[in-house]
Image: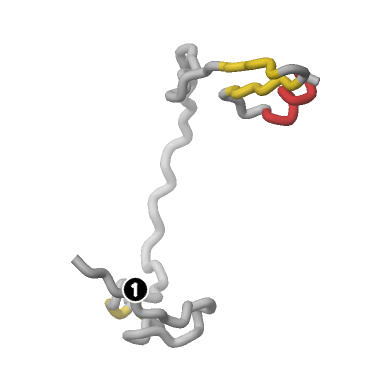
Amino acid sequence: MKVTYAEEKPLLEYDESAPGDRAGKSFARELQYTVATPTRRWPTPPRSRVEQTYTTPVETHNPMELSATLASWEEDRLTVHDATQWVQGDAGVLA
């Protein structure tokens, strides 16, 4: 199977015309809107008070990646491979 690509100019501004002229359209359909003034008022609901206590169980963080550290000395050089999100902090601790 051979794949070919055609270079196109990027659409960088919303106002720029694009293939199919999307102005005033959403997913190629004309936008519809209605302006109206309500003719009746909703009835005022009776005042009420609801008191309830909600609780959430303890959540434990279980990352999908495995945590491991591999370290090796080669003469006076330490090489560390670590599963961390604290790269600069680990480097400081090891130093």
Asked if residue 13 is positioned above or below residue 82 in the image, the reply reads: below
Can the viewer see residue 55? no
Viewer-proximal residue among 85 and 5: 5
Residue 81: image location, x then y, percent: 60, 24
Q: Secondary structure at mark 1?
A: strand
In the displayed orientation, state which residue is furthest to the top: 58
Q: Which residue corresponds to the image point at 42% horizontal and 81% vertical from the top-left? A: 8
Residue 4: image location, x then y, percent: 29, 74
Viewer-proximal residue among 81 and 33: 81
- The quadrant in which the N terminus is found is bottom left
Asked if residue 33 is positioned above or below residue 94 in the image, the reply reads: below
Is 83 positioned to the left or the right of 24 in the image? right
Is 92 positioned to the left or the right of 6 in the image? right
Q: Which residue corresponds to the image point at 47% horizontal and 78% vertical from the top-left? A: 11
State the residue position of label 1: 26
Residue 56: image location, x then y, percent: 47, 16
